[in-house]
Amino acid sequence: MRKKYVIQGLVMVALLVIGTTPFMWGNAEKMYPSISVESENVGGFTRDEWNQFVAQKTKDYGEKEIVLLLGKTKDGWKLKDIHGAVDEEKTEKIWEIGRTGDVFSDWYTRWELLIRGKDIDLPLTYDKKLLREKVNSLVEKYSQEPKDAVPVIDANGHVTFTEGVPHISLDAQKLYDTIEKALTEGKHTIQIETTEEKLPTLTVEEAKQFDTVLGVYSTAFGGDYNRSENIRLATEAISHHVILPGERFSFNEVTGRRSPENGYLPAPVMVGSRLEPGYGGGVCQVSTTLFNAILLSGLPVTERECHYSPVSYVPTGQDATVSYGDLDLCFVNSFSHPVYVYAVYQPGQVTCYILGNETDKPSSAFVTTEYSEVIGHKKIEKMNPTQTEERIEEIGHDGYRTQIRRHAAWKDGRTYTDTFSSEYEPKDTIISYKEDPKKKVEMKKQEKTKMDMKKELKIIKPKDKKQIERKIREE
């Protein structure tokens, strides 16, 4: 009998312990022990400590990034960009764990905390409208054709590149749903399904090998719209080309035929000794500018021709004319690293850069004139009885025979020197007359002679006067 009472007493004590321990454990003014938030122990936090913890988590959360894996491309934004924050209303329920006022529920929760603890993810919130805007912006960004990384050149010639942009086909609604689901699950690195991806030809990683300017040259031009537009098209055509070691660059191959189908407009072009309207007028200014940048980079030029006459935008002998299918400008990459042609059009100016690796950069490079000779022009006179007055049909100019020398040197002792000869033909001045000017001069001389002889008659003796008059008549 006594044993029975002992057992009953033990049971009563056990029940008392079971029933009261959860309410005796912990402090009603503090967070209950064994509670952690995202693996950080917050058990025992006072109300103020809890509020401070939540505020810091909100700040940290805003700085977190949503990382979107779009095939081989990575993009995203910070959570604060969509007003990401800790959900204050829901975090209040974390503080209330074990103290809801429901005795049985609190008893069960406290026992659960006592036995195995509890780790809780912070409830988060964000602006769904802003998320939608971000998604639409991302879809628009990648719907364009791929864009290569673009050089950024500082005052010291150091080169960095912007990010290239691939073409990626994305479904806006699927993208939104995928991101929303991931955020709900507390995931911040999200794999996105893509249907098509076209990468740029030059990525930022690949562009790192182009870290300096090897050579640069600029020329200025006037305001004729058609010529300026042709210069712009040719500048854009040669820009962003990578030439690997040993490869050849051809201006004509890169720019293509200068035709209306390719956007070129009629503008003055040199045909022989005359300026005539032709599609692509002005393109030679781009080839000339590139030629001078190549000279200063130390790269060998394998094909180049001068104009019929000197041009005004570079010193005599430093021009390079081109004509599709006929005259070309070519060079070869003789360096151990790739080089990058970068050309910039601005209204009134075109600039060409040769970018490359610092180890290939010449320590000095310059161009000098070896000699320059003048080839005189002639004056040609023509007769045209139908015209009423003298007319200049063509204004001529002298020609030149010149040679320039390029010298480049590198820190390791290497040097490279070559010469470029140019011969610019003279252009004759042509003047047309109604009458032969030589005969006209001779007639004036004869007329003057007669006048002089008549004057002499006034001062000679009378007996000789008749003989002189007879002589004048005979003449």
Image (cartoon, rainbow, N blue to C red):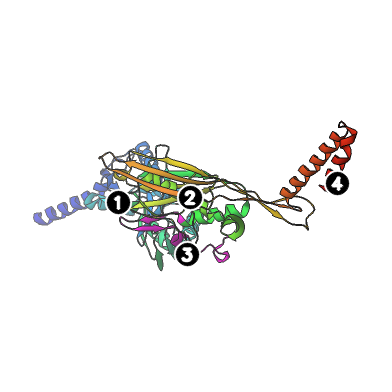
Q: Earlier in the sequence, mark 4 or mark 1?
A: 1
Mark 1 surroundings within 10 Å by alpha-carbon count, few (fewer than 14), some (14 through 19), many (20 or more): some
Secondary element type, mark 4: helix
Q: CA distance from mark 2 to mark 4?
A: 58 Å
User: Which of the pair 285/146 is nearer the observer?
Assistant: 285
Q: CA distance from mark 1 to mark 3?
A: 30 Å
Three-letter amino acid code at the position of disc 4: Arg
- Give the labeled residue for mark 3: 325
Q: Are marks 1 and 3 in contact (CB under 8 Å)?
A: no
Residue 104 x %, y %: 32, 54
Q: Earlier in the sequence, mark 4 or mark 3?
A: 3
Three-letter amino acid code at the position of disc 2: Glu
Residue at image point 82% right, 37% down: 452
- Give the labeled residue for mark 4: 473
Q: Nearer the viewer, mark 2 or mark 1?
A: 2
Look at the image and give the residue range highlighted in magenta: 238-264
Q: Nearer the viewer, mark 4 or mark 1?
A: 4
- Give the labeled residue for mark 1: 337
Q: Decide whether residue 240 is among the magenta residues.
A: yes
Q: Earlier in the sequence, mark 2 or mark 4?
A: 2
